[in-house]
Image (cartoon, rainbow, N blue to C red):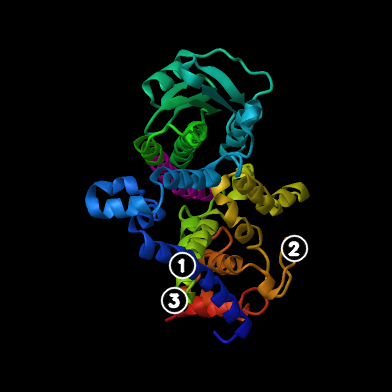
Amino acid sequence: MNNANNREELDSIKDKGVSLFARSLDIMDDDPLEEIFALNLGDFLSESLINEELACKISNKKNKNEGIKEQLRELISIYSIDSTLSLLGFRENEDYIIYDSIARAIKLMLSLEECNIYLSVKKNPLKLAGTSLDNPNEAISDYIKESFEKEKVVTYKDDKFVTKIFPMKNNFECIGSIETKREISKPLEKQYEDMLKITAGLFVTSLGIQKLIDEVKRVIDSDIITTSELQNLRAQLTAIIGDLQDQQQAFVETTARAVDLKSRFKTTHSKDVAELSKEISRHIGLNEKTTDLIYYAGLLQNIGKITLNEQLFTKKDKLSKEEWEKIQEYPNAGVSLLMNINFLSEVIPYVYYQKERWDGSGKPEGLKGMSIPFGSRIIALADAYCALIQDRSHRKALTNKEALEILREECGTKWDKDVFEALYEIKGD
């Protein structure tokens, strides 16, 4: 790369990656047991493998209980609802807002006739907790009970609608059901069903973490709690956090597929953009955390389109002014969704600014040059390349050579030249 300022920017990003490991290296020299926990495995996994002499040496360095309590407090600070957004951005004492908002968001995203959420709190009978309707029927049908009790998807039809009920469950429990209703001529596509299942599981796990955190808070300052009890709590918390992280990744990937389906893109468009963005990031030499964030942002760059009516993407006539404005606003809608999903907050700048252009002619802020976040520049170019080599309603797919030639001509106006050079080194003949 020839641009000195860009080189300084890349070095800064890389340095942040190096600093992430500095503490771990110090810990390893000092205490190998704690290094295992720092890697998110938890020393409860390995204590049986440590000989008595080493265990004694470690335990003499610091009170064992206090060490575990510190680790628990650190986990609580990261995952507690007090310090981060809940799944959809609301506090626990506003349940009626949470569940109505979820139901309405699902209805909008999946083009449903209606959506209802039923919960069983502390093993109490099922009740309607949230709805997309203004005047809902709160009766619990046998179909909803069956979905909840048997933990399975239940489907039934009438003359106008297909109703599908999804259990809200994870590996540990089932807490309710999500009821969806769609016109009988438009049954739910598999991508939407997958998204609903993942969303339901993610929601249950998020609530499970909060319940476990509440339990930890109640006992963590007790003088009579034993080391084994603390280790058990830490084991439970670490395990459920691991489940949450797996579900988060699945949520991002299924959401991306649902967006591509709704916007009539090639069904792997978002995945293609994300993979190419990751490849460019690695080629340039960005650290793993930054690369992962850019990958997620690449998957979700078009997430706002899931809030738009499908008819906008299938309409063959010229769009009205109002329809065009809705499409232009989808990045803002996407950012609003991301702001309300706690684990995706770090990708927001990359998504929000990915329509900025190098010469300042883009949106939403007219940022110019290196003032545009580096991840946004990478995603923008990757998206443009993937779009050019795919068929569109108004043209056939371009060849790799043709696409690269067009992008080269737009360097310095639309694209960062150094990012393009990385793309060319990857894709050029």
Q: Residues within 10 Å of mark 1 (few under 14, many from 20)?
A: few
Q: Which residue is denoted by mark 2 in the rendering?
A: 365
Observer-nearest of 121 and 328 = 121
Q: Residue furthest right?
A: 321
Observer-nearest of 120 and 232 = 232
Q: Residues within 10 Å of mark 3 (few under 14, many from 20)?
A: few
Residue 20 in percent (x, y) is at 48, 64
Q: Amino acid at mark 3?
A: Ile
Mark whose residue sits in front, 2 or 1: 1
Residue 422 horizontal side relative to residue 82, left or right: left
The reply to whether callout 2 and callout 1 are in contact (CB within 8 Å) is no
Mark whose residue sits in front, 3 or 2: 2
Q: Which residue is denoted by mark 3 in the rendering?
A: 426
Q: Which residue is denoted by mark 1 in the rendering?
A: 22
Disc 2 to disc 1, how far (Cα)?
A: 36 Å
Which residue is pictured at 72% across the width and 52% down the height?
324
Residue 361 horizontal side relative to residue 154, left or right: right
Residue range (magenta): 237-260
Q: Amino acid at mark 2?
A: Glu
The reply to whether callout 3 and callout 2 are in contact (CB within 8 Å) is no
